[in-house]
Image (spheres, rainbow, N blue to C red):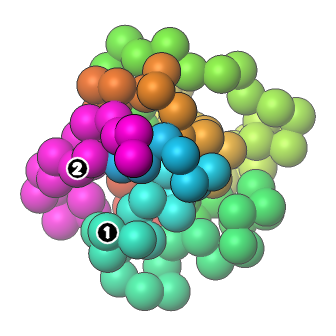
Amino acid sequence: MSEVRIEIIDREGQLHAIDAPTDMSMNLMEVVRAFELAPEGTIGICGGMAMCASCQCYVLSDTDLPPKGDEEDAMLADALFVRDNSRLGCQIAVTSELEGLKIELAPAE
């Protein structure tokens, strides 16, 4: 199994350094759910369709990410707590390029 080290700051401010698999076709939202870094029912409410922004996160590292798609841009335009570094975790696939990524989960409310 191939993995990348990702640092995630949860909504309580706790830092989690995790090894996320790159060979399971997961996205960041699914990683947060799999590692139980947010209470159940508070992240990925739409199932990863870029329709709810419950998986919004702030990118804190200089990691090169794929550009935002139209759906992600549209959802972030209407979401709360949006910053310049906001992304939807469901739209970022876990690949080897994410090595060293650091994110912070946006507030749920």
Q: Which of the pair 87/90 is nearer the observer?
A: 90
**Image spot of residue 102 (x, y percent):** 29, 33
Q: Is residue 32 magenta?
A: no
Amino acid type, residue under disc 2 in the picture: Ile
Is mark 1 in CB contact (under 8 Å) with mark 2?
Answer: yes
**Dominant secondary-structure state across the stretch colored magenta:** strand
Q: Which mark is residue 35?
A: 1
Q: Which of the pair 86/91 is nearer the observer?
A: 91
When asked about the image quadrant of residue 11, the answer is bottom left
Mark 1 vs 2, N-terminal side: 2
Mark 2, Cα crowd under 10 Å, few <14 / some 14-19 / many 20+, is some
Q: Is residue 13 magenta?
A: yes
* Residue positioned 53% across, 46% down in the render: 23
Q: Tell whether 8 sits left or right of 42.
A: left
**Which residue is tagged 2?**
18
Most distant residue in the left direction = 14
Above or below, 70 relative to 46? above
